[in-house]
Image (cartoon, helix red, strand yellow):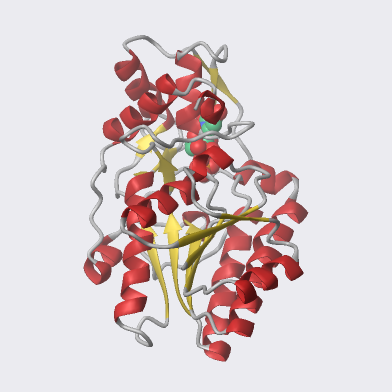
Amino acid sequence: MILVSGGAGYIGSHTVLALRERGRNVLVLDDLSEGHEEALLGAPLARGSMLDRDFVMKTFEENDIAAVFHFAARCYVGESVQDPGKYYNANVNGTLNLLDAMAATGVNKFVLSSTCATYGEPESMPIVEEMPQKPVNPYGATKLIDEWMLKDFHRAHGIESVALRYFNAAGADPEGRLGEDHDPETHLIPLVIDAVMGKRDKITVFGNDYDTPDGTCIRDYIHIVDLAEAHILALEAMEQDPGNIGCRAYNLGNQAGTSVLEVIETVAEIAGKPVPYEIGERRPGDPPRLVGSSAKIGRELGWKPRFGDIKTIVETAWKWHQTHPRGFASS
Ligand code: UDP
């Protein structure tokens, strides 16, 4: 079976669904501190914390685990600047507990949720994997440490791994079964949708004085289903070619930069009404522009985005928010 840490969360739950649709056996490891039981859609759950070493070890000893997908982590840039300890604890210690349990029980396939935040503020775009990784916030730093640990655990214990450096995950299951439900929500697209639906007064744009065409930050949004697919391709590559994957890292973006104001315009177009917004201060830790090239994963694993354009991404998120105005509580 595939152990999916954080499988009740946003990206994890979409990946669990994709695995099960391919007939894979899955065990979710999640403490439900941020994830939702409803998001499991009936997948089996080992409920507990990644930081509980005994629980993690026991889960490996009691189950026939062939590979690990590791999503359980803290993932907010702004919060990581304010509370770095929380990030180093969850994202470094949590990953270490998993890797130690894998080494102890002989599990040797691992897919890591990494991030474009490991690059910091590269001098040229699009970002390719060979560029230096110099994170500018604790979130990015913790994920870079995870990537280092993977190299060392490969060398010492033969654990093969693929680190997927996501750009901005967005959108929802096109069939409307799953979507994004964070409390509090901090991500741009759901916040803009909430603003246009009247669930919040307005959205604050974090700075419009960046060196970008409209002055607002540019990000590369990638559909959650395309992300899930990349995890499965990574797993299949490790299964088909054992010993040859080693320790790899791939970017996952669409090579399309979309500014905050362009996201607001796209939501307004889909909703058929203007989005109430104001311009606010810059958010500490935010690089002006992050756009990634996914050419390497396309070339090496055959990954191709199916929902690449921002309009489709926002449309699927919009559909989820219309049918689930209170998130999973509406299920
Ligand atoms: N953003 C914004 N207002 C908000 C939330 C986000 O202007 O209320 C901006 C943020 O500064 C960044 C982009 O939207 O440039 C995407 O932010 P998000 O938090 O969704 O993802 P991140 O890029 O931090 O992973």
**Quarter of the image holding residue 232?**
bottom left
Q: Position of residue 8 (x, y in %)?
A: 55, 47
Q: Residue at x 43, y 37 (%)?
A: 178
Q: Does residue 60 sit above or below 44 in this rendering?
A: below
| 1 lies left or right of 242 | right
Q: Residue at x 67, y 51 (%)?
A: 31
Q: Residue at x 73, y 62 (%)?
A: 51
Residue 207 in view? no
Q: Position of residue 47 (x, y in %)?
A: 66, 54
Q: Residue at x 63, y 62 (%)?
A: 142
**Quarter of the image holding residue 256?**
top left
Q: Position of residue 293 (x, y in %)?
A: 31, 57
**Quarter of the image holding residue 87?**
bottom right
Work out whether residue 32 or residue 221 is closer to the camera in this orientation and state it: 32
| 327 lies left or right of 176 | right
Q: Position of residue 84 (x, y in %)?
A: 73, 53
| 100 lies left or right of 225 | right
